[in-house]
Image: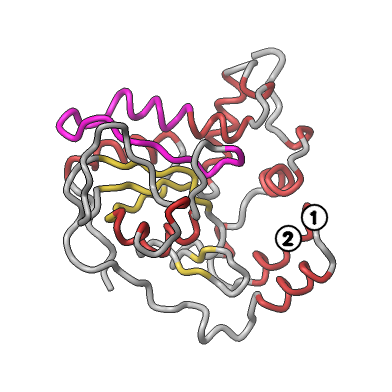
């Protein structure tokens, strides 16, 4: 099925997000997700918004390999970014909020925001949200699989407006995993059996044959999987 078309009002916002390093965006109807999850996982709404049983307009935002270069440039420009508790998540939020401040369509009003970071005010099942939007497929190893990027992407934020949602039924990607001869499930089960930590969760991602040309840079992998600050981009002391 064809993915949901991006509403014209959101096109400048999505272009600015991509230019800043968050190059994935998928519009959706909040009802496609909210009706499939328990109430505690539903998408955020701003105080005072009326009930909308038909759903609202939402935009799912994600990153791919190129985000690391944009993040590295931000680290080089700021001596404070790498001192925050989670520099990459801090950068994501700064990008989204900065782009919203400059490019949010006034006609849509202020959006409610949801974040994928650990400890975010509201827990959202971002994998299920990506599937509901038609942007990705959920693999047997529970990673979301993008038709071009494979597993080499991540969903970072969702923006919700009190506006009419995209029309029609929810889109669904054709299952890219059913005919897979490689299979991520064995690597995933091995990681579970070993009670994997850190890079122990990398083999299921590497097992996917899709998107291998979009594999993250080595330092990005090491930082995201271990959380160790030594893998953060280093600021040039002469800069």
Q: Residue furthest top?
A: 238
Residue 44 in the magenta stretch? The answer is: no
- Quadrant in which residue 75 is drawn: top right
Q: Residue at x 65, y 32 (%)?
A: 86
For the residue labelled by badge 2, is the local secondary structure a helix, a strand or a loop? Answer: helix
Q: Residue at x 68, y 68 (%)?
A: 204
Q: Would you say the residues marked 2 and 1 are in contact, meaning their CB atoms lie under 8 Å apart?
A: yes
Tag shown at residue 201 = 2
- Quadrant in which residue 158 is drawn: top left
Q: Which residue is mark 1?
A: 197
Is residue 51 depicted above or below 46 in this figure?
A: below
- Report the magenta residues as a range: 94-119
Is residue 188 depicted above or below 30 in this figure?
A: below
Q: Residue furthest right?
A: 194
The total number of labels drawn is 2
Q: Nearer the viewer, residue 217 or 58?
A: 58
Distance of label 2 from label 1 (alpha carbons)? 7 Å
Q: Quadrant of the C terminus?
A: top right
Q: Residue at x 38, y 42 (%)?
A: 44
Image check: 90 left or right of 46? right
């Amino acid at each position: 099925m064809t993915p949901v078309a991006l509403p014209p009002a959101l096109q400048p916002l999505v272009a600015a997000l991509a230019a800043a390093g968050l190059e994935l965006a998928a519009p959706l109807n909040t009802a496609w997700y909210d009706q499939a999850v328990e109430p505690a996982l539903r998408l955020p709404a701003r105080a005072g918004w009326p009930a909308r049983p038909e759903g609202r307009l939402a935009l799912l935002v994600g990153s791919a390999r190129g985000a690391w270069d944009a993040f590295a440039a931000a680290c080089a420009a700021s001596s404070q970014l790498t001192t925050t508790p989670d520099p990459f998540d801090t950068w994501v939020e700064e990008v989204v909020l900065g782009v919203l401040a400059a490019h949010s369509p006034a006609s849509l009003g202020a959006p409610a925001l949801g974040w994928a970071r650990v400890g975010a005010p509201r827990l959202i099942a971002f994998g299920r949200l990506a599937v509901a939007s038609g942007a990705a497929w959920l693999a047997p190893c529970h990673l979301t699989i993008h038709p071009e990027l494979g597993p080499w992407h991540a969903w970072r934020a969702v923006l919700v407006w009190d506006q009419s949602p995209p029309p029609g039924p929810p889109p669904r990607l054709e299952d890219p995993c059913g005919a897979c001869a490689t299979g991520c499930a064995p690597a995933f089960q091995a990681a579970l059996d070993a009670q994997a930590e850190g890079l122990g969760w990398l083999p299921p991602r590497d097992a996917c044959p899709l998107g291998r040309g979009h594999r993250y840079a080595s330092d990005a992998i090491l930082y995201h999987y271990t959380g160790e600050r030594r893998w953060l981009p280093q600021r040039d002391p002469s800069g």
